[in-house]
Image (cartoon, rainbow, N blue to C red):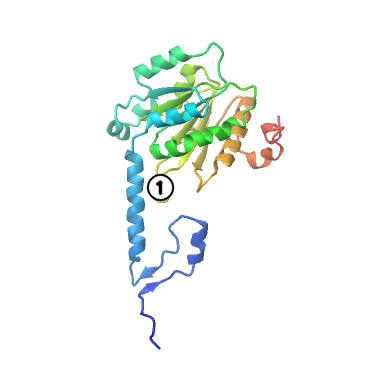
């Protein structure tokens, strides 16, 4: 009987845990080194993360998808003229260019909208393109029927704080940034949601609420939408967002008729 060929690869005893996560655990080894397939997979993930940072936002495609879904749109650009400036000058990504500022000022409605949503490239345009529109469709189904929303703003070369200026110029009561997060080695297309009540230039991160890792492999569109609407309603009830607004959606969403009132004690 022929013996099977010997192998130098030693499997990690935690191998079975890999079915529950995309994190790099239980990689095994060959001698004192990682296995070839592990090294190659790491190189691929690193290349995908770098590509996600530099991939430009296909604004026309996002705009078309939004309009097909029934959303009105506006397009803006930050003060960073290109990707190179955006990566080297984060401050430029936090403010609009002059043309965008004029455009939003002209589009301001007489009655302030309850919320404005911004789809922004951030550090992963791939995330914005893949998940922005499906997430907004899920949010729309859950928003209070008497709430009004401004046209969805598509922002290029944007940082999170750009939403403050967008919301201020449109007179919105709240702004939600749907922005590509910094790519990880297992998540090049993770979308982050940042909610700010009474947006204006100069708001700090402590005055925002964040929902992270929105994508099919992470937080689903339905879960993220329910959590976001819970926070939106809570911010409207409290008159603030950020550290003063707790995400008790796991409890509060058990009775959606009451929304955040139970969790916030109001």
Q: Position of residue 144 (x, y in %)?
A: 64, 27
Instruction: Please indicate, yes or no, whether residue 183 appears anywhere in the rendered image.
Output: yes
Q: Position of residue 258 (x, y in %)?
A: 71, 32
Front residue of 89 and 222: 222
Residue shown at the point (34%, 72%) measured from the top left: 31
Q: Quadrant of the C terminus?
A: top right
Left or right: residue 24 versus residue 148 is left
Front residue of 238 and 221: 221
Q: Quadrant of residue 39?
A: bottom left
Q: Quadrant of the N terminus?
A: bottom left
Q: Position of residue 160 (x, y in %)?
A: 43, 31
Left or right: residue 6 versus residue 202 is left
**61 above or below 96?**
below
Front residue of 43 and 161: 43
Front residue of 141 and 96: 141
The number of discs equals: 1
**37 above or below 54?**
below
Residue shown at the point (49%, 33%) measured from the top left: 133
Residue shown at the point (33%, 45%) measured from the top left: 50
Instruction: Please indicate, yes or no, whether residue 209 appears anywhere in the rendered image.
Output: no
Residue sticking out furthest to the front: 68
Q: Which residue matches tag 1? A: 184
Residue shown at the point (60%, 28%) measured from the top left: 235
Q: Secondary structure at mark 1?
A: loop
Q: Is disc 1 surrounded by few (<14), some (14 to 19) or many (20+) residues within 10 Å?
A: some
């Amino acid at each position: 009987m022929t013996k099977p060929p010997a192998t130098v690869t030693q499997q990690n005893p935690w191998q079975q845990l890999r079915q529950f996560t995309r994190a790099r655990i239980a990689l095994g080894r060959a001698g004192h080194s990682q296995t070839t397939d592990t090294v190659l997979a790491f190189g691929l993930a690193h290349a995908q993360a770098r590509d996600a940072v530099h991939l430009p936002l296909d604004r026309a495609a996002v705009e078309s998808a939004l309009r097909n879904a029934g959303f009105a749109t506006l397009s803006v650009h930050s003060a960073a003229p290109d990707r190179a400036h955006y990566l080297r000058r984060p401050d430029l990504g936090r403010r609009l260019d002059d043309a965008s500022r004029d455009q939003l000022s002209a589009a301001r409605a007489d009655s302030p909208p309850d919320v404005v949503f911004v789809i922004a490239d951030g550090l992963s345009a791939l995330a914005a393109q893949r998940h922005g529109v499906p997430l907004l469709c899920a949010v729309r189904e859950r928003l209070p029927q008497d709430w009004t929303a401004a046209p969805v703003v598509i922002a290029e070369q944007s940082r999170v704080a750009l939403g403050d200026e967008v919301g201020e110029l449109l007179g919105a009561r709240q702004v939600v940034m749907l922005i590509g997060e910094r790519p990880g080695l297992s998540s090049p297309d993770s979308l982050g949601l940042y909610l700010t009540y009474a947006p204006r230039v100069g708001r700090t991160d402590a005055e925002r609420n964040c929902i992270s890792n929105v994508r099919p492999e992470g937080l689903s569109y339905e879960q993220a939408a329910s959590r976001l609407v819970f926070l939106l309603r809570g911010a409207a009830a409290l008159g603030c967002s950020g550290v003063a607004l707790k995400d008790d959606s796991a409890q509060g969403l058990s009775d959606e008729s009451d929304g955040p009132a139970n969790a916030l004690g109001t």
